[in-house]
Image (tube, rainbow, N blue to C red):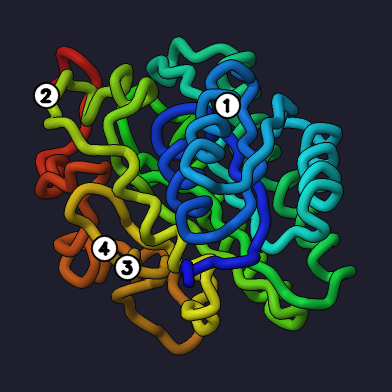
């Protein structure tokens, strides 16, 4: 018996890398898989590999970054397998550029594929799951880039939005037996090969992108029926739970705060606890002040 025997669903952006790994393990563990990628030739290779190993899979070249594409994916899954039990929203692109030089198109295209693509695929799938009445599972894909990363205003915004969408969707869909989680994956892929960390070219050792798949399969399995609204760091040696966003320290003042009150208390009470920013989480570097060039 596989961990997801008899289940059926969709993995977007599945022709290579992390998505491919999801598909191979889902099929190995007994699930039917719609292997979706705009690069149909790569998706066909994944399907052929699954079928050669005795699994069940079909190809989709639909654009997951459109409502029409999302509807096509869910319809194809139901037509092929009789139902949809899971949606893995994995498709993504990069259009990295520093904030001051980023174009409208670079911003909007990344948001379309990541944020709107996740919204459309998840919504269409969840509506069908509700109609079926048997619950279901959604697994979204966020990234540590939403902590902040140089040159990725568009991508970090998209991945932060997906994390927040995951929290809200999990609250709203629980009544229908639909669980919603996200992974923050790691792996050596075409996308990771073009990204930089903290604005620097950093040599990162090879990480098998398929190592994210076991957590995804577990989240889709019935064994994880108690897990929803969570972001899990996966890949390599990692199995990390991401902390939920929260206010972690503060003060209350009866009647509210005047500007004089804030000035008197901010530095000693909060100013010495400022959070480091970015993926690398270096110690907070700005206590000496942030000044224009030539004004140091």
Location of residue 273 with respect to 293 vertically, above or below:
below
Q: Which label lies toward us, 3 or 1? A: 1
| Quadrant (top left, top right, bottom left, bottom right) of the C terminus | top left
In this rendering, which labeled residue sits more in front, label 1 or label 2?
1
Q: Which residue is mark 4?
A: 239
- Tell me which label, 2 or 4, sits earlier in the chain: 2
272 or 224: which is nearer to us? 224
In the image, is 60 to the left or to the right of 288? right
Q: Nearer the viewer, mark 2 or mark 4?
A: 4
Q: Horizontal and vertical percent for residue 271?
A: 21, 60
Q: CA distance from mark 1 to mark 2?
A: 29 Å
Q: Residue at horizontal 26%, vertical 42%?
A: 278
Tell me the tag on residue 203: 2
Mark 3 falls on what kind of element? strand
Whether residue 104 sits left or right of residue 176 in the image: it is left
Badge 3 or badge 2: first in the primary sequence: 2
For numbered disc 4, what is the local secondary structure?
Answer: strand
From mark 1 to mark 4, how far is it between C-alphas?
Answer: 28 Å
Q: Quickly name the residue at label 1.
A: 43
Q: Nearer the viewer, mark 1 or mark 4?
A: 1
Q: Earlier in the sequence, mark 1 or mark 4?
A: 1
The residue beneath circle 3 is 241
Q: Where is residue 128 shown, x and y percent of the image?
A: 84, 61
Q: Could you give the CA–CA distance between mark 2 and mark 4, rounded to whole angstroms?
A: 22 Å
């Amino acid at each position: 018996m596989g961990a997801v025997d008899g289940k059926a669903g969709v993995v977007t952006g599945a022709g290579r890398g992390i998505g491919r790994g999801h598909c191979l393990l889902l099929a190995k563990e007994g699930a039917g898989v719609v292997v979706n990628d705009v690069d149909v030739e790569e998706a066909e290779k994944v399907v052929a590999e699954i079928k050669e190993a005795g699994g069940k899979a079909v190809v989709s070249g639909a654009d997951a970054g459109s409502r029409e594409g999302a509807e096509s994916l869910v319809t194809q899954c139901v037509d092929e397998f009789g139902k949809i039990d899971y949606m893995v929203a994995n498709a993504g692109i990069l259009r990295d550029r520093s904030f001051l030089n980023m174009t409208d198109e670079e911003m909007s295209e990344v948001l379309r594929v990541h944020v709107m693509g996740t919204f459309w695929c998840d919504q269409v799938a969840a509506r069908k799951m509700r109609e079926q009445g048997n619950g279901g599972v959604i697994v979204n894909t966020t990234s540590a880039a939403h902590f902040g990363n140089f040159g990725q205003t568009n991508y970090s915004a998209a991945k932060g939005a997906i994390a927040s969408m995951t929290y809200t969707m999990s609250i709203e869909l629980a009544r229908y037996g639909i669980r919603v989680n996200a992974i923050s994956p790691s792996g050596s892929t075409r996308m990771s090969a073009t990204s930089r960390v903290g604005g620097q070219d950093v040599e990162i050792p090879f990480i098998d992108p398929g190592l994210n798949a076991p957590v995804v399969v577990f989240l889709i399995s019935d064994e994880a029926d108690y897990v929803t609204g969570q972001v899990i760091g996966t890949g390599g040696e990692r199995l990390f739970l991401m902390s939920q966003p929260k206010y972690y320290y503060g003060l209350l003042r009866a009647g509210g705060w005047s500007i004089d009150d804030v000035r008197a208390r901010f530095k000693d009470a909060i100013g010495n606890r400022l959070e480091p920013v970015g993926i690398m989480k270096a110690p907070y570097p700005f206590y000496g002040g942030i000044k224009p060039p030539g004004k140091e």
